[in-house]
Amino acid sequence: MKKLLAAAAAALFCVSPAAADVLVDNVNGYTLTSEGRLVRFAALLVGDDGKVERLFQRGDKKPERTRYRYDAQGKTLIPGLIDGHGHVMGLGFTALQLDLSDTGSLQEAQAKIAAYAAANPSPRWIVGRGWNQERWGLGRFPTAADIDAVVKDRPVWLERIDGHAGWANSLAMKEAGITAKTAAPGGGKIEKGAGGQPSGIFVDAASELVAKVVPAPLPRIRDQALAKAQELMLSNGLTATADMGTSPEDWLTIRRAGDAGRLKVRIMSYGAGIESILAVAGTGPTPWLYDGRLRMGGVKLYRDGALGSRGAWLKHPYKDSPRESGLGFLRDDEIRNLMSRAAMDGFQVAVHAIGDAANAQLLGAIEELADTYKGDRRWRVEHAQIVDPADLPRFARFGTIASMQPVHEASDWRMAEARMGMERLGGAYAWKTMLANKVPLAFGSDFPVESPNPFHGLAVAISREDAQGQPPGGWMPEQRLNLEQALRAFTLGAAYAGFAEDRIGTLERGKYADFVLIDRDIFADLSPAAIRETKVLQTWIAGTRAWPN
Amino acid sequence: MKKLLAAAAAALFCVSPAAADVLVDNVNGYTLTSEGRLVRFAALLVGDDGKVERLFQRGDKKPERTRYRYDAQGKTLIPGLIDGHGHVMGLGFTALQLDLSDTGSLQEAQAKIAAYAAANPSPRWIVGRGWNQERWGLGRFPTAADIDAVVKDRPVWLERIDGHAGWANSLAMKEAGITAKTAAPGGGKIEKGAGGQPSGIFVDAASELVAKVVPAPLPRIRDQALAKAQELMLSNGLTATADMGTSPEDWLTIRRAGDAGRLKVRIMSYGAGIESILAVAGTGPTPWLYDGRLRMGGVKLYRDGALGSRGAWLKHPYKDSPRESGLGFLRDDEIRNLMSRAAMDGFQVAVHAIGDAANAQLLGAIEELADTYKGDRRWRVEHAQIVDPADLPRFARFGTIASMQPVHEASDWRMAEARMGMERLGGAYAWKTMLANKVPLAFGSDFPVESPNPFHGLAVAISREDAQGQPPGGWMPEQRLNLEQALRAFTLGAAYAGFAEDRIGTLERGKYADFVLIDRDIFADLSPAAIRETKVLQTWIAGTRAWPN
């Protein structure tokens, strides 16, 4: 009798937690599998651990008793999107700061600066970002005088859209002690105006001359910024992201959220330089923390700057500025030493490389280091925008990951032509070639440089057209992907790039139930405009609705 | 039948986790209660959550089935000791570094420096601490030349036993760019030798001039230091400590241990200054992390220096150096602003105050702030060593905690007499008066300034004699405590001082089962020598043996 009772008890009660599952029913579900097949399903069962227990096809027998059953009423469900390259705190700060990214002219930017100053009497510094003189059609960099004309009694410091240049007013330069005699640091440039006076523009490493005197944000603002970033991610359907350049301050902010149960999205953190990984993670990657929501697994390094500010390091001079060929921040041995320093402790290495010279040298560094650091290293090239066609096959040799941002192509193609000419762009934004070469491809947005909305990226990926449909038929259309390929790079590919493909990226048994419900069947209408306009209805993480809440 | 089965199941199985408890049986147990009674017990039952379920008296019926029963064979069990004022990373670093605390003369110190240099060819800098020219009977501070005589080809930097002065050799001063022209910062002093040359001694804030060029320890060394500190705490019977001055780097190190399951002791963390609490905890105390093993609940501030280096701020000049009256680091408004900045976000405030002037001004600041920051604030005065008898009653007014270190009295009494004369020491190390005034008293060791061994502190607390039994009968023996009072300050008092008395400090139902088994019944033989020599046999935390392991 005792045995019988035991068996009965086990059956009725102690195993009954299985009845505490969540059934997401009546969905038009899509997921890739780990093997890369696209499969459909009609319902999804989530276990107590927030992981997928199984998918059901229409007509499959579903469990009768679950803790919670959500009827999706036929809506389309896809895996949570994963951004392979974002800046989490930057996204939040941008949303809180003066945002010039939607300004179409210098005059519009000036008006917005004046209005922001009036609306925000404190703190004293006015900090913002998002300007793009290319978009303004200004034909020159803006100057300190352009800001002084609207705000001169408070210091103003505005980052360029790509983060690779800063624009100061005269008071900001004065507080930073910048004079005509100030020398630009290596890897940076101070633009000069009439009489050799600094014009107000500080490129790449020179930005630090001003940035260092901007008061650091208070923790309250940092916490707000992270909350805002999470809201923006979730409302755009992102359930996870790589954070490309986590400082110790960023890390402490994210941990505060984690400790307080306010961390919802999953963050694959790459420390901002060697110092950050040493300070935070110490002698090797951290474990996954907060139920798989945070891990510092690697380091983010820089090989060059960006194309817009002519910081991208090119093999030949810029076509539209023949005395420049960009900024190679580090010598060969320097970048190798940094990569080696991280790799020896088991950290993954992700290196920003935009210009063809930067990409070539980085590939050379990987080839050299791969001999020493064997095993599954997943070296990451971030951006890999302008690659010499001769270098494209080198990506595949050591499993190097191409971490690319489709929207950059749409934003940059005109500028890229101007900077380099078509004849040098044969390996530019070459997603399809990467796949053809069997290079693991991860997609992202580089938010806040671009919008975090992954549907913009998917639309560009399948069209090579920008939001205005330009150029019609796509720029270098042979590099277009199909939607399945693009979605894979924005889910499983981005997860793989972060050593997380065993837990996220697809909806399969044993992986976290991270998914989004969207307002249309993206596989039914494959027009770029339709995909771009996709609205996220709900975002779930680990089987719980995280947005809206 | 279904109902019957359910009931049976509940009884037999689903509640059966209670059978997963730990019984620590056959002990000679002592604990205080929250009300302050000393009670005895013969066995202790620990629940699955690591907390005390109940105590058993001899003859009480004990549960028959437990997951684990440990037979203590009659050994004495007392609550885990809690250090109200320690420096966790400092304890670990000290153990890894050159330790001069056991040297009895300058010659002995020189020999030890030379031996350490020979035994540790890397890293280049030789860093250590623990010297005490008072103990050496040197009659002067040591000089750079004293180190140069044994090591001159590597920079050497040695902190004084109390952390309030540093001793450099000539190469260290050269690398720090120290010359005869170098000015001491406010709150600091550079000792000068013949011809106005810096002698090699840097007092209080001036230490930073050299300390800032000492290479920061690598994370591997930090992790080793924390492991060492935990081992030293556990082997001395400490299960918890206040960490007085946690830097962000310290915090990240402790979190690495927590994340990896290597954090055993409980740490009540006080951030090193406002910047640390803002960077780490942000807008208020952190939650308890890692099952009650870590929380940053407050800030550590400094009001003055130490007596040994004449940094303690006195109301009247030093008797043995009439032109000095110590270092008041901050003006009244400055310390109040700092305290206010922390208190407004709900952080507890702990302020170092050693001299009578420092204590008086700090009490004034508390009196002013207590008006604004109401509720259970538990303002802490750290050390409270030399208090003007007129100021002693002020402690009790706003529930201010006296966080004191008994061993300091034994180490300092001769020096205190020399520095101030007996006529000014009526309120020195006045533990008994604090208790008589109903001031909450927390005891600690200030490790690594003193040994972390709390039995040394207990022995001094009941005797006012040092390890050599000096002075016989005790210095100002009217301030002796009885053992129960001393033990309370080292357990419940230290827990209360850290807002942790609801979870640690006594062995009562619902509190963590943190305890130690020791080699004698400290209540049976109350001689100071017997208590001082107590050996810890085992240290348990949350019902699990943490040491030895």
Image (cartoon, coloured by chain):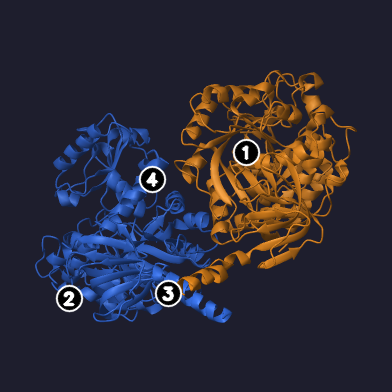
Chain colours: A orange, B blue
Q: Which residue is mark 4?
A: B222
**Which residue occupies the foreground of this view, B1 or B57?**
B1
Q: Nearer the viewer, mark 2 or mark 3?
A: 2
Do the residues bearing badges 1 and 4 touch, measured as CB atoms within 8 Å? Answer: no
Can see residue A331?
no
The 10 Å Cα crowd at callout 4, few under 14, some 14 to 19, many 20 or more, is: many
Q: Pick whichever of labels 3 and 4 is earlier in the sequence.
A: 4
Which one is in front in this view, the residue at disc 2 or the one at disc 1?
1
Q: CA distance from mark 3 to mark 4?
A: 39 Å
Q: Amino acid at mark 4?
A: Arg
Q: Quadrant of residue B17?
A: bottom left
**Residue A357 spot, x, y in % from top left:** 66, 22
What's the chain of the residue with tag 2? B
Q: Which disc is residue B185 wearing?
A: none
- Spatial CA distance of label 1 from label 4 is 30 Å
Q: Can you tell which mark lies on residue B478? A: 2
Q: Residue at x 61, y 24 (%)?
A: A397
Q: Are marks 4 and 2 on the same chain?
A: yes
Residue B343 higher or lower than A176, as above or below:
below
Three-letter amino acid code at the position of disc 2: Glu
Q: What residue is shown with label 3?
A: B367
Q: CA distance from mark 4 to mark 2?
A: 43 Å
Q: Secondary structure at mark 4?
A: helix
The residue that mark 1 highlights is A497
Can you say whether B96 is above or below B117 in the image? Answer: below
